[in-house]
Image: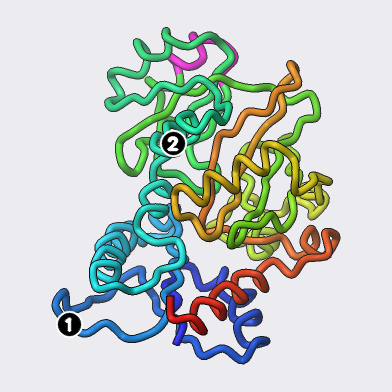
Amino acid sequence: MIHVLYENPAWLPPLATALDARGLPWRAIDASTGFFEVEGDIPAGIWLNRMSPSAHTRGHAGGIHYVREWLGVLEERGARVVNGSHSYALEVSKVRQHAALHTMGILTPRTVAVVGRDQLVAASRQMEAPFITKHNQGGKGLGVQLFRDHDAFDRHVGSEAYEEPMDGVHLLQAYIEPPSRSITRVEIVDGQMMFAMRSATDMGFELCPADACQVGDAFCPVGEAPTSRFAAEPIEADDPLVRAYIAFCDRHRIDVAGIEFVTGADGRRYTYDINMNTNYNSAVAKAAGVDGMAPIAALCERLLATGR
């Protein structure tokens, strides 16, 4: 049995289709709320973690912590979890992502972590303008705003528009302005690149590619953005950055990831975000000749067959 831990039902149908197409036994478990017995028996099978770090925007903040504890219990009992506790810890912390990427020699934008609204103005003086803000526990580009001067940032911090991050941790990050006005996301499953996707940034930084977010989903502020905002990006599997991403996923036990980078005016590629509850834009996947969820279903099938 494949046990799918999910939080947003709008993102479940493409995965359900892929699992059903292979005739795999599976069940969906709404992990936004619930209970489990810590010393109880663990059902046999493979566990697929699809909890989103943006769950709190849908009223499911408790589910984020609930799944963290559940994954720990499952792994303590020897269960195989796709995107388990270690990768999940990275999923909900951009600070940890940044540190892990830097350790492996993957270029990242300069970043300062800040706790406390009263510390933001002083911390911002460590940054040269322009810079961006973001939430440490994000998803969907939460809290990402661009400031081209410190005065504008100071006014924002003191205004009603200021938004406290879910975990209280802000990030101030050097803004890498892309001449192409786009960013690139590399989709990796089971140690292989599936395809890369270019996302235009003209309409802001909230770049959830899921199909559900392209039809006015109330919880995904991409809203009515046209499909052309996303397009397939030709990147070879032997590209040095792709190889670095695959090595990164292997080291950190990440089974499924969408890793994002931006190419600056200096031609260098800066990696700034890792998404492990990845969703696929069907139009882009079709253009790339890939069924986005099929490789995830294939991974689950392989793990289920080997019992590992």
Determine the residue positioned at 76% across, 30% down: 181
- Residue that label 2 marks: 100
Q: Amino acid at mark 1?
A: Gly
Q: Amino acid at mark 2?
A: Ala
User: 104 or 167, which lies in front?
Assistant: 104
Q: In the rendered view, does 209 fall on the left or right side of 254?
A: right
Q: In the rendered view, does 104 fall on the left or right side of 123?
A: right
In magenta segment, residue 153: yes
Q: In the rendered view, does 123 fall on the left or right side of 201?
A: left
Which residue lies most toward the left here?
39
- Residue that label 1 marks: 40
In the rendered image, which quarter is residue 141 located in? top right
Magenta part of the chain: 147-155
Label 2, residues with CA under 10 Å away: few <14, some 14-19, many ≥20: some
Secondary structure beneath disc 2? Answer: helix
Classify the position of the C terminus by image quarter: bottom left
Q: In the rendered view, does 165 fall on the left or right side of 69?
A: right
The answer to whether 170 is drawn above or below residue 295 in the figure is above
Q: Whole-percent x and y of residue 122? A: 34, 10
Task: Identify the coloring.
Answer: rainbow
